[in-house]
Image (cartoon, rainbow, N blue to C red):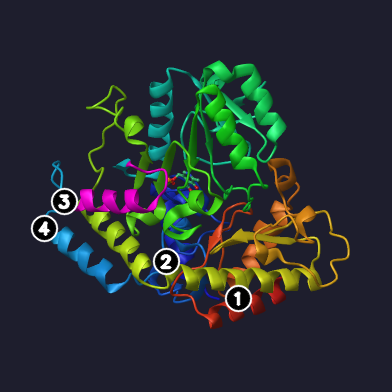
């Protein structure tokens, strides 16, 4: 593949954009390809190369690069009628009503502009509503570029995971291993009176894709109830992707107090949201005393695109299609791994998938791998699926990033370059795309 133009553009970008990009994950080695345009489930780069796209903008693009006609019409209508006012519009109410109608935890909502802004506001709201300071997070989880959650270590030694955050900010964050009921119970025993909330992705989707073991979210729910803390599900990735219109909380049957959203609910435009019980969401100013505000929040174009996006999913076989292809892809990859690289495992749920380059090989699987089964405990490969940050830390990231990802790109398949970031099937993908991808996997592995 020729990448001359991308290389030149990256050279220009390096002198005016930090690292040549506007989001660190895009700075792939040796240089990223620059995108010219999207086409359904594909992207075409500045040199005319075409790729099957599973990055999908890191999650928002449920339909791929051709939004359904009602979405496009709504975007044009609202863009040419304003596009924004600094005063409320009916479309914000309609979008909020739709989300509240479908998502179990949501009675009221406030829209913001990114997933990060949503989790920042949710943490502030949890602290304001409970009068407490501490937030429990999961090691290996991700909640955006915010001070309270860019924290690593354990509950005894939390410290910032990046420079630029004072050590003292991390004091109020308690990172625990995901799927470890004892560890979180201990933290509640010690700090229960000062825990404002537990912030957790219902499926951890930023360290590979790690599902909760049976009963884990119920345990979190019980601990929060017992200690007067709030359970906050970060559904920025899983919202309207896992579990269809009810989101992951519907799938797992556990209702959090607060939910954060982003990605899909903006229909491809910048968005975030915090939803929950009315008595909590009303504690935001002006009805309450937890400050929240934003120039672009509830932007009419975003609200219109997001609303038409979700309405289309409600009226068509969108989840059926993407989940079927997701499962087909996971099963196909699992079979290929079993033949060619049994030490690697495929993880995922609904329309999300990732291959984790673990270094510990499984026992004889007897052709029984059901990695497409979303990590059910009865799957013969279950013991080899990562369940905690420590499991994931065994992954061979160099092999993924330096060899496999490059090889897949050269074969026309665009995956997330980081070993731990999820990948997504979209409504525009076809069975042929999946088959082409599986062929590329065979070659690359
Ligand atoms: N929460 C989760 C679970 C995410 O995966 C992300 C981003 O990928 C965020 C929050 C932050 O969202 P944004 O990048 O829109 O700020």
Given the current orientation, which residue lies at the most extreme left position?
Answer: 81
Q: Nearer the viewer, residue 104 or 10?
A: 104
- Mark 3 is surrounded, within 10 Å at the Cα level, by few (under 14), some (14 to 19) or many (20 or more) other residues, namely few
**Viewer-nearest of labels 4 and 2?**
4
**Residue 336 is at least partly visible in this image:** yes
Q: Residue at x 37, y 53 (%)?
A: 102
Q: Position of residue 192 (x, y in %)?
A: 58, 20
Spatial separation of the CA atoms under disc 4 and disc 2? 29 Å
Q: Reply above or below: 393 against 129.
A: below
Q: Is residue 303 magenta?
A: no
Q: Which residue is mark 3?
A: 90
Q: Is residue 100 magenta?
A: yes
Screen quadrant of the C terminus? bottom right
Write down the quadrant of residue 5 in the picture: bottom left
Circle 4 SS class: loop
Q: Reply above or below: 57 against 15.
A: below
| Side of 296 relative to 322 (left or right) | left
Circle 1 SS class: helix
| Side of 80 relative to 182 (left or right) | left
Spatial separation of the CA atoms under disc 1 and disc 3? 43 Å
Where are the magenta residues, as a range? Answer: 90-107
**Residue 3 is at least partly visible in this image:** no
Q: Residue at x 59, y 35 (%)?
A: 220
Write down the quadrant of residue 75 in the picture: bottom left
Q: Which residue is mark 4?
A: 81
**Viewer-nearest of labels 4 and 3?**
3
Circle 3 SS class: helix
Given the current orientation, which residue lies at the most extreme right position?
Answer: 364
Q: Which residue is mark 2?
A: 35
Spatial separation of the CA atoms under disc 4 and disc 1? 42 Å
Q: Which residue is mark 1?
A: 437
Q: Reply above or below: 124 against 201.
A: above
């Amino acid at each position: 593949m020729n990448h001359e133009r991308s290389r030149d553009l990256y050279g220009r970008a390096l002198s005016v954009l930090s690292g040549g990009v506007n989001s660190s994950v895009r700075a792939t080695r040796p240089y990223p390809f620059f995108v010219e345009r999207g086409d359904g489930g594909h992207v075409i780069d500045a040199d005319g190369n075409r790729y099957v796209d599973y990055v999908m903008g890191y999650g928002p693009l449920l339909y791929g690069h051709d939004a359904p006609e009602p979405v496009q019409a709504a975007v044009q209508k609202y863009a040419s009628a304003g596009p924004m006012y600094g005063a409320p519009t009916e479309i914000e109410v309609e979008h909020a009503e739709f989300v509240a109608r479908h998502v179990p935890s949501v009675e009221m909502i406030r829209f913001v502009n990114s997933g990060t802004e949503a989790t920042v506001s949710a943490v502030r709201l949890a602290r304001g509503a409970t009068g407490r300071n501490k937030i429990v997070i999961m090691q290996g989880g991700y909640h955006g570029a915010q001070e309270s959650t860019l924290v690593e270590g354990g509950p005894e030694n939390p410290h910032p995971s990046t420079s630029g955050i004072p050590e003292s900010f991390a004091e109020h964050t308690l990172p625990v291993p995901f799927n470890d009921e004892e560890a979180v119970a201990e933290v509640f025993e010690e700090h229960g009176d000062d825990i404002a909330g537990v912030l957790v992705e219902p499926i951890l989707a930023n360290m590979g894709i790690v599902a909760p073991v049976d009963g884990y979210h119920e345990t979190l729910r019980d601990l929060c109830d017992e200690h007067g803390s709030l359970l906050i599900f970060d559904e920025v990735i899983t919202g309207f992707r896992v579990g269809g219109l009810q989101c992951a909380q519907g799938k797992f049957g556990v209702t959090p107090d607060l939910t954060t959203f982003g990605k899909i609910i903006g229909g491809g435009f910048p968005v975030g949201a915090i939803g929950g019980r009315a008595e909590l969401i009303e504690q935001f100013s002006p009805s309450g005393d937890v400050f929240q505000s934003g120039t672009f929040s509830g932007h009419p174009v975003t609200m219109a695109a997001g609303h038409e996006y979700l309405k289309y999913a409600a009226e068509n076989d969108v989840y059926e299609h993407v989940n079927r292809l997701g499962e087909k892809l996971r099963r196909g990859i699992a079979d290929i791994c079993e033949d060619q690289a049994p030490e690697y495992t495929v993880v995922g749920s609904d329309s999300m998938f990732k291959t984790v380059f673990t270094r510990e090989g499984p026992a004889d699987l007897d052709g029984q791998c059901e990695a497409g089964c979303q990590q059910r405990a009865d799957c013969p490969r279950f013991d080899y699926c990562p369940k905690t940050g420590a499991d994931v830390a065994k992954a061979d990231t160099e092999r993924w990033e330096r060899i496999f990802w490059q090889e897949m790109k050269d074969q026309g398949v665009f995956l997330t370059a980081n070993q731990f970031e999820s990948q997504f099937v979209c409504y525009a993908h076809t069975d042929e795309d999946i088959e082409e991808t599986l062929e590329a996997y065979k070659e690359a592995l």
